[in-house]
Image (cartoon, helix red, strand yellow):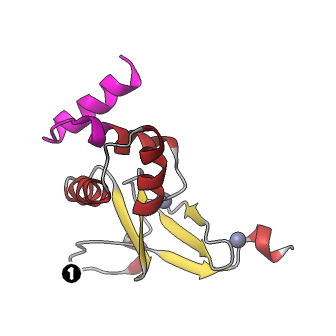
Amino acid sequence: MNKTEQIKKILLNNKIQPSLQRIKIYEFLLGNKTHPTADIIYNNINKELAIISKATVYNTLKLFVEKNIISEITIDNTESRYDYNTKFHGHFKCEKCNTLYDLDLKSDFLNSLNLNGFKINNSHLYIKGICKKCNSN
Ligand SMILES: [Zn+2]
Ligand SMILES: [Zn+2]
């Protein structure tokens, strides 16, 4: 199965009609694991596929988040970034270069918080600061 077929299958498994635009957006997220913004996704796909509109990108990302095949990261309320990785992990945001680093969190991390009796609907864990690279410059 080629990449496009695989993506089609993932979309269909999640009851999403696999239009060309949707396939391209998901493909971009898989190939660019840097937590891109909607604008970055739009600008890159638009280079090769001029038929895509900004509204399509926003609507598609919203649909993907609803269907849980990607996750939305809103560390800053000024921008959302998108993550192909929906498994539980944290993020470190560098306030200088804007890079979002993945933080490995042990799957029992939430259990260690002693939230007995609490119901978790959503969990996002992040740290802000200056990354190693920027800090050494
Ligand atoms: Zn940095
Ligand atoms: Zn991530």
Give left or right: position of 111 versus 121: right
Quarter placement of the C terminus:
bottom right
In front here: 73 or 49? Answer: 49
Q: How far across and down, in percent of the image, does residue 22 sit?
A: 28, 42
Q: How far across and down, in percent of the image, does residue 88 sit?
A: 40, 60
Q: How far across and down, in percent of the image, does residue 111 sit?
A: 37, 71
Magenta: predominant secondary structure element?
helix
Q: How far across and down, in percent of the image, does residue 2 sit?
A: 39, 19
Please tell me which residue is depicted at 21% across the width and 35% down the height of the picture.
18
Question: As drawn, which residue projects farthest toward the right?
Answer: 137
> What residue is pinned by disc 1?
117
Please tell me which residue is depicted at 28% across the width and 71% down the height of the picture.
122
Please tell me which residue is depicted at 32% across the width and 32% down the height of the picture.
7
Give left or right: position of 70 versus 137: left
Q: Quadrant of residue 136?
A: bottom right
In the rendered structure, which amino acid carries the disc numbered 1?
Gly
Magenta run includes residue 60: no
Q: Quadrant of residue 9?
A: top left
Q: Is mark 1 within 8 Å of ligand 2?
A: no
Question: As drawn, which residue projects farthest toward the left?
Answer: 15
Quarter placement of the N terminus:
top left
Q: Which residues are magenta?
A: 1-23
Q: Is residue 92 above or below residue 50?
A: below
Give the structural element (helix, strand or loop) at label 1.
loop
Please tell me which residue is depicted at 43% across the width and 75% down the height of the picture.
79
Magenta run includes residue 8: yes
In front here: 1 or 55? Answer: 55
Q: Crowding at label 1, few (<14), some or many (≥20) Cα neighbours within 10 Å?
A: few
